[in-house]
Amino acid sequence: MILRKLADAAMDVVWPRRCAVEGCGRPVDRPGRHVCSACFATLPYHDRRGCRICGSVPEADEPNDFTCADCLESPPAYDLCRSAVRHEFAARQLVLDLKFRRWTWLQEDLVDLLEGAARAKLDLPEVDVVVPVPLCRGRRFVRRFNQAELLAEGLAARIGRLCLPGALARTRDTGHQSRLGGKARRDNVKGAFEARLPELLRGRTVLLVDDVSTTGATLSECAATMKKAGAARVWCLTVSRSVREQS
Ligand SMILES: [Zn+2]
Ligand SMILES: [Zn+2]
């Protein structure tokens, strides 16, 4: 690890790395990172105040502390969900590049986003452990890594908490959810997870981490599973959040 970092630093002097954002091409001026400071500063940050539970931002102005219609109608099992950026433009590209092009070297850049959101939007001292949303074994085998695990491990190291990738497992593949609506997504993930380390979850405040959230159905099902196993609170944090909040 140290050798790799030294080699990277030497390469940066000889041949500066270029920003990973498509169409940028500037040399990267953030040490050990792959996104330049200009691109990093102009990502579509999800910083308007949203629903106090799911964090979704309404189109019309709402009072400061409100609960959205979706959360009132079918309250999620998690206690709250926050995200760093909207899933669009360069933010979407980086999240998808990590997952589908296996650009795992984007880890630190994306963990920067998670850490920033965690410090700004969560009461961090309350968090006991960090748990990633698991992939099913087949998909993990094909992709060779779980992007949520990479992000959760990076974040846990930054905030000095234990990361427990073994705390949740998928009991079956839930397929691609992208074409399903909110209700269908909730039905599709029902019972798809299993808590494996109940003794480490009991009474704890768990920070559940994923790369992107759309309707929050997967996060809610993971939270329900961990709460059944004894977790006291489950807070969710994702790098990006789908802009069109579906219900
Ligand atoms: Zn750039
Ligand atoms: Zn809500």
Image (tube, rainbow, N blue to C red):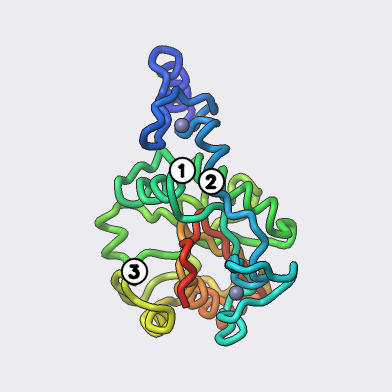
Q: Quadrant of residue 231?
A: bottom right
Graded by Cα atoms within 10 Å as few (under 14), some (14 to 19) or many (20 or more), the crowding at tag 3 reads few
What separation in Å lies between label 2 and label 3 (alpha carbons)?
24 Å
What separation in Å lies between label 1 and label 3 (alpha carbons)?
24 Å
Q: Which label is found at residue 107?
A: 1
Tag 1's secondary structure?
helix
Q: Residue at x 65, y 49 (%)?
A: 160
Q: How many marks?
A: 3
Residue 158, x across and y down, in percent: 62, 45
Specify the farthest residue to the front: 60
* Three-letter amino acid code at the position of disc 3: Ser
Residue 5, x across and y down, in percent: 47, 26
State whether residue 35 appears in this view.
yes
Q: Are marks 2 and 1 in contact (CB under 8 Å)?
A: yes
Task: State the residue position of label 3.
Answer: 178
Q: Is residue 112 left or right of residue 187?
A: right
Q: Residue at x 57, y 58 (%)?
A: 83
Residue 135, x across and y down, in percent: 37, 64
Residue 209, x across and y down, in percent: 52, 60
State whether residue 201 appears in this view.
no
Graded by Cα atoms within 10 Å as few (under 14), some (14 to 19) or many (20 or more), the crowding at tag 1 reads many
Q: Is residue 134 left or right of residue 116?
A: left
* Three-letter amino acid code at the position of disc 1: Gln
Q: Earlier in the sequence, mark 1 or mark 3?
A: 1
CB of residue at label 3: within 8 Å of ligand 2? Answer: no
* Three-letter amino acid code at the position of disc 2: Val
Tag 3's secondary structure?
loop
Q: Residue at x 59, y 68 (%)?
A: 58
Q: Return the residue nearer the eye: 38 or 27.
A: 38
Q: Which label is found at residue 111?
A: 2
Residue 237 to residue 105: above or below: below
